[in-house]
Amino acid sequence: MANDPADSPAGSPTAELTPSAENRRQVLYWRLLSRIFDSQEQKSLESASVAIVEDLGLPPSLLDPSVSLDSLVQRFPELEPQFRDLDQGAVRNAALVSKLLINVYATGTGPVSAAQLAAWKEDAKWFEGALGRDGEGTLKAVESDLVKRMRLREVLADPGLARSLTPSMSLIEELLRDKSNLSGVALQNAKALIRRFVDEVAQVLRTQVEKTSVGTIDRSVPPKRVFRNLDVQRTIWKNLTNWNVEDERLYVDTLFYKQTAKRTTPAKIIVVVDQSGSMVDAMVNCTILASIFAGLPKVDVHLIAYDTRAIDLTPWVSDPFEVLLRTKLGGGTEGTVAMAQARPKISDPRNTVLVWISDFYDNRDLMRDFESLHKSGVKFIPVGSVNSSGHASVDPWFRTKLKDLGTPVISGHIRKLIVELKNFLNT
């Protein structure tokens, strides 16, 4: 293919551009922007871009978004090394990079087929190979949008394509919403994806929870008066008034011992989860977190999910995968039905923490229940969002009331909730 006579010297993209090369590169990038943002100037930029790529000796199909990178390279093998090594001169690079960006980011609107998703994933591999993984986060965002628009059942019916899907929160939400409509191979593939995602998140959360000490000192049990439990520092401090200046001796009237008795009854954690669709991120994270704490010694974990009805998921609390399969996203919210199930589980208020996960657009009578629980000595932790973004829409009325109660709504990274639970278990 011919070299661009107006390109940078020696084909170096970093060398100073001639005015002609700079103008031609700008045309290609303006076309890129018009393709992504649907500019009114698209038609004239398309014709100008065709003239430029032909003059560069590049095929006009390079400008066709419907042609995948695989197809393009198969028809024009000499392009493969150029995509692999973007060191072809500024104008030629603009044409190659534009192809990569348009195929990956200009995904249009409307339904997405299984074949289209598969083609996009292959183009994304070319993108990462040429430009590195700096755009990994935005690629996941684009894929999430495609997942929401695709014919999910068609994809799940193809084992090969289903395995190629990257488990993400948006994908899990779609799977949970549609699981009742799936059967056979599609249902098995959906379960496999949910299991993969649960295992990945659990591994991350487990590292944050590990080394948690759940044994706490029971102050109600008198310390054993044996030498190994002698609290030397406290004994000295408490007897300083007995210091004799003349003989320079400390006379000890009372010995103090360290308390070593550990809590004999398990700490109880009750997690109540709002199943509304807006809470799926927090629900998935906290369900997995509940299973991790359920595996700790001397911790008794209970799990309740609710919409307009409540279901006790405690028998499956150790397996978040099974819990998620039993959840039903969407519908209304009536927290009082969940409270009716949670209250009987509280036998020792000061040894109980209640984690309530919701956006709190709910029955305001709940506030009286929250106040009563807090007054009884229950450690109450309201959770609006625990994810990577920290974004959450929480009913302003509840947010203010809970803050005034001294139990502000947690939002942000799930580490915040982990810290709260650790503090409870270690007090």
Image (cartoon, helix red, strand yellow):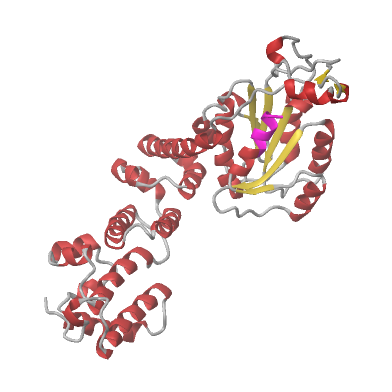
Q: Quadrant of the C terminus?
A: top right
Q: Residue at x 35, y 57 (%)?
A: 133
Q: Where is residue 9 in the image (x, y as percent from the top left)?
A: 19, 82
Query: Which stretch appears magenta?
Result: 420-427
Q: Which residue is drawn at 21% across and 83% down?
A: 7
Residue 310 seen in the figure: no
Report whether 324 appears left or right of 223: left
Q: Is residue 156 above or below residue 269?
A: below
Report whether 326 appears left or right of 250: left
What secondary structure prevails in the magenta region?
helix
Q: Residue at x 25, y 63 (%)?
A: 68
Any magenta on residue 50? no
Q: Is residue 325 above or below residue 50?
A: above
Q: Quadrant of the N terminus?
A: bottom left
Q: Position of residue 37 (x, y in %)?
A: 43, 75
Q: In this view, does 143 lie above or below 324?
A: below
Q: Which of 272 and 413 is in front in this view?
A: 413
Quadrant of res 136: bottom left
Q: Residue at x 21, y 79 (%)?
A: 53
Q: Where is residue 242 in the image (x, y as percent from the top left)?
A: 87, 21
Q: Nearer the viewer, residue 13 or 371?
A: 13
Report whether 183 appears left or right of 373: left
Report whether 16 appears left or right of 79: right
